[in-house]
Structure formats: structure tokens, C-alpha cells
Amino acid sequence: MELLKGKETADFIKKEISAKVAEIVANGERPPHLVAIIVGEDGASKTYVANKERNCAQVGFKSTVLSYPEDTTEEFLLGVIDQLNNDDEVDGFIVQLPLPKHIDEEKIINAISPKKDVDGFHPKNVGLMLLGEETFISATPYGIMLLLEHYNIETTGKHCVVLGRSNIVGRPVANLLSQKSKYGDCTVTICHSRTKDIEKYTRDADIIIAAIGIPEFLKGDMVKDGAVIVDVGITRVPADNEKGYRIVGDVEFDSVAPKSSYITPVPGGVGPMTIISLMKNTLKAYELRKKSK
Ligand code: NAP
């Protein structure tokens, strides 16, 4: 069994991005600029945004966080998005989800300029991704693909089972793995909450991507020997420590790891890859904006 070390891989990519940013700045230009919008007081969202800020600082990006209260109106938020869409000093921005219930997430995502949509959630970017064309691929699926690439995991002709069909993880990653490409060419099965006998699929899988949000759902007796396991799950479960919680994935590591050929740890697997993919997308947005000038 070998660990798919997301933290190490992300650090490696971070160095590449930092070098590019240093070059940009040495040429007398401003660094790439990422803006994050956060509405409300969700603790996990604040942690994610703080993490994104830290990563921006590490690679040399400018980063701005716009925090608004829970009772912010949809109209106000659309106004902010319009300003950012037209601000030449901003290369990319994200709206941290979930938004408070009174704000229509779809409307907000649709209002983001696809050129600045570094989360890759805009329908235009999702469509380009589905067609296998150049676009911003959303951060978690992109991070998973980069991790498979970094470890040169053989995917061609393999049976990949994706657990979960969300728009931000399950469906896009299933699509990317089925595309005609070096780290694609898989035969993909998508399982979800209505799938019967899920073990029937997981036991046949060469690669399993678990993205359902149920702690330790996937057990050792559900996987075949030598499978590649990517655990996307992040659930906070109460723990007797300083924070009062610990992070648990969708895979029961202790029973699955001995059977696997490769497995991601949680934390330190897909999480860091997600953030670094956002950094990659921001650099790309910067480069595209410069090219279009
Ligand atoms: P989501 O939107 O809640 O989707 C969960 C998916 O799992 C749904 O498709 C659901 O099926 C399926 N599901 C639920 N119970 C199931 C069961 N018993 N058997 C099979 N499938 C089941 O979640 P998400 O946003 O994709 O996130 C999934 C997990 O990944 C969460 O723990 C989240 O925190 C984590 N995550 C991590 C990162 C990272 O950077 N590491 C990024 C994003 C998300 P239905 O469609 O039928 O409801």
C-alpha cells in the first residue's frame, strides 16, 4: 500500500506556482489576485476561506476576502459580483458555498463571469468540461485528477466506481475519468443513495472515489485487493481534543488501506489538492486575462 500524499503533491505544485508568480512580479507586473466572498457565519466556510488566504500568501497571490453578514440580500450580492466581473485588478473570484437560504445559489453562480469563475461552477465552464475542452475545472475533481497524474496511476481500461453524484465532486470527476485522455479512459460507474447492493460495484472496482459525506462508509470487505482508493469525504465528528472534533473521511482507513494499492489519507489527501487546484485556476485566469489584452 502506498499513500497518495495530497499535502506533499500540493506543496510540489505550490513551488511551481510560486516560481511563476515570482517571474511575473520580477517583470514589474502585479501578482494574480483572487477574491473570496463569504456570507454569514458558517464555521467550516470560514476555515476554508482562511485556508485559501493562507495558500494565496504562500504562492505570492494577492488575496481579498469580502465578508458580509447573514442577512445580506441577493440583490446586494449580485451588485458585488457585477463589480468584481468588471474589475481589471481581479483575476478570479469565488463565492463560498453554502449561502444563506434566502439567496438563490444558482442565480449567484450564473452571475459570475465565466472568465473569472475559478471555482468552475458556472454552467458554461461545466459544459466545456463535459466536452473535454479547455476551461476552469472545479477544484476538487481537478485536484483528484492532478493527484492521480502525480502518482502516475494507470487508469486506462480500469473500472472506476464513484460514490456520490454531486455537481461539485461526483459527477464532474466521473466525467473526467471517462474522458478520452491519459488519466481518463476509465469505465465509470456512479453510485448514489438509491443504488442497490453498492458492494457489488465497489468490490469490482479498480479505482474508488468516495464522495458521499458518510464517515467510514467504505469498509475493507467492500473493496478488492489492489484497488486505488481516493477518499474525498470530510466530516467533523466530535472528539475529545482541543478543537472538540476530528476530521473523518468516507473510508474506514484501517480496514481498507491493507487491501489497497494506493490510498489517500484524511486529512492530507484530497483537501490540500482542492486548494492548490484553485490556485492553479487563478493563475490560469490571470494568464488568460493577460493574453486577451
Ligand atoms: P453532497 O452534495 O451531499 O452529495 C453526497 C452524495 O452522496 C449524493 O450524491 C448522495 O446521493 C450520495 N449518498 C448519500 N448517502 C449515500 C449512501 N448511503 N450510499 C451511496 N451514496 C450516498 O456531498 P459533496 O458536496 O459531493 O461532498 C461529499 C463529501 O466530500 C463531503 O464529506 C464533503 O465535505 C466532502 N468534500 C471534500 C472536499 C475536499 O476538498 N476534500 C471538497 C468537497 C467536498 P443522492 O444524490 O442520491 O442524494
Image (tube, helix red, strand yellow):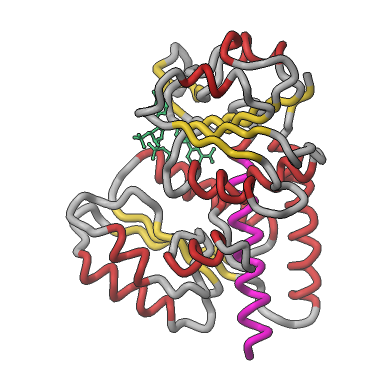
Left-right relation of 287 to 240 = right
Residue 39 drawn at (x, y percent): 31, 55
Residue 14 drawn at (x, y percent): 73, 52
Ligand 1 placement by image quarter: top left
Indicate whether 145 appears above or below 111.
Answer: above
Query: Foreground residue, 62 or 120?
Result: 120
Tell me if residue 92 is in the magenta stretch: no
- Residue 250: in sight, yes or no? yes
Tell me if residue 286 is in the magenta stretch: yes
Numbered range of the magenta stretch? 272-293
Q: Quadrant of residue 17?
A: bottom right
Query: Foreground residue, 173 or 285?
Result: 173
Quadrant of the frame with the N terminus:
top right
Residue 236 drawn at (x, y percent): 43, 25
At a point 52% along the width and 49% down the height, the residue shown is 172
Residue 209 drawn at (x, y percent): 58, 33
Indicate whether 81 appears above or below 207.
Answer: below
Indicate whether 91 appears above or below 259.
Answer: below
At a point 42% along the width and 23% down the height, the residue shown is 214
Quadrant of the frame with the C terminus:
bottom right
Left-right relation of 97 to 198 = left
At a point 69% along the width and 37% down the height, the residue shown is 6
Indicate whether 194 appears above or below 54.
Answer: above
- Residue 244: in sight, yes or no? no
Query: Foreground residue, 161 or 143?
Result: 161
At a point 82% along the width and 40% down the height, the residue shown is 152
